[in-house]
Image (spheres, rainbow, N blue to C red):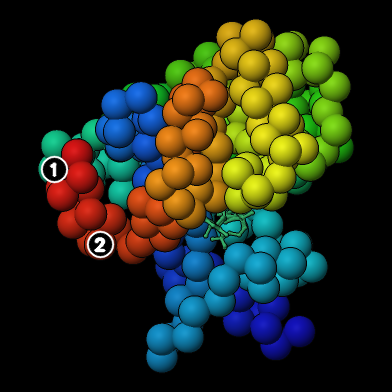
Amino acid sequence: LQRVAELRAGIAAGELTLHFQPKIALASGAVEGVEALVRWERPGGAMVLPQDLLPLAERAGLMGDLTDAVLEVAAAQAARWRAQGIDLPIAVNIPASAISDDRLPRRMSRLLAEHGLPGSALQVEITEQALLTDPDGAQEVLTALHDLGVRAAIDDYGTGYSSLVRLRELDVDEVKIDRSFVVPLLLDERSASIVRSTIDLVHALGLRAVAEGIEEARVADALTDLGCDAAQGYHWTRPLPAPELEAWFVEHR
Ligand code: G
Ligand code: G
Ligand code: MN
Ligand code: NA
């Protein structure tokens, strides 16, 4: 209970911060955007990571407030970067409870206007699991976001058994292949088959394939050979605070 009160106060006090992990276009090596990952920075320096923060927010009924705060920080950061000539779309993870909430597109629209941003400055990532919870609600919200120019990715793909029909109907642009398939790509023939067929399926639907969890150059090379469009992972960098991400970007663009 005390932690719930602390989290509520912490969100109100602006203690949620974002780290950013670059997304690399495999064919060119260019940085095409970043994924925002939330942290709760307690006064005094302790940092609460998503694995503890998200369940706490969920139990406390604060997931909506957390998502609003994350979107606000992301929009402000996107505006600062654009003012510096750094044009990096920021992808925000959206929880299941928000993706079928029709207030999300209105919030996004207001946020973009307030920060003078085009829709393309922000992206959303929704887990495959979240889409299964309320597919029809999610479909409406994704269409409304698409109309704003906000691109959408299905996250952790391969873990949720969503139907191909559903994937075809949704207004999504990208599918992110879960790292549990990517990490063993070169070790395990079955993982390799899953990754190869997922990339082909994603392309057959006219979408982009993004791989997560690349930790070695030879995995990046294998994914490039398989035609995977983009990737993220510790091979390039772990998620970084904004100033460190800027320094990294200046060296790698
Ligand atoms: O940063 P990383 O370890 O530890 O993130 C762990 C998990 O938390 C990932 O599945 C990621 O999608 C999720 N996550 C990170 N940031 C956010 C956020 O701002 N909102 C939501 N809903 N999930 C997030
Ligand atoms: O579920 P989501 O894709 O949003 O999760 C992102 C999570 O993956 C973050 O916790 C991030 O720190 C982690 N991550 C990013 N790159 C790598 C990687 O190369 N290897 C591993 N094991 N985790 C990674
Ligand atoms: Mn994600
Ligand atoms: Na993911």
Q: Residue at x 50, y 43 (%)?
A: 219
Instruction: Find numbered disc 2 in the image and state the secondary structure of the residue it sits on.
Output: helix
Find residue 5 and report its horizontal and vertical position in percent.
Answer: 66, 80
- Relative to 63, does residue 232 appear above or below in the rendering? above
Q: Residue at x 45, y 44 (%)?
A: 218
86 left or right of 59 in image: left
Q: Is residue 151 visible?
A: no
Instruction: Find numbered disc 1 in the image and state the secondary structure of the residue it sits on.
Output: loop
- Cα separation between marks 2 and 1: 15 Å
Which residue is labeled 2 in the image?
Answer: 244
How many discs appear? 2
Residue found farthest to the bottom: 44
Foreground: 207 or 35?
A: 207
Find residue 161 and report its horizontal and vertical position in percent.
Answer: 85, 33
Counting residues from the N terminus, which is met first, the one under dot 2 or under dot 1? 1
- Relative to 150, does residue 4 appear above or below in the rendering? below
Name the image quarter holding the N terminus: bottom right
Check residue 84 in the rendering and tell me which mark sits there, or answer none.
1
Find residue 31 and report its horizontal and vertical position in percent.
Answer: 30, 37
Name the image quarter holding the C terminus: top left
Ligand 1 within 8 angstroms of badge 1 C-beta: no
Asked whether the residues under the numbered discs 2 and 1 touch, taking CB atoms below 8 Å apart as contact, a structural biologist would say no
Check residue 223 in the rendering and tell me which mark sits there, or answer none.
none
Foreground: 223 or 161?
A: 223
Q: Is residue 163 visible?
A: yes
Say what amino acid the circle numbered 1 marks: Gln
Say what amino acid the circle numbered 2 marks: Glu
Foreground: 96 or 179?
A: 179
Q: Residue at x 36, y 61 (%)?
A: 240
166 left or right of 105 in image: right
Q: Residue at x 41, y 53 (%)?
A: 235
Q: Quarter-wise, where is residue 132 in the image?
A: top right
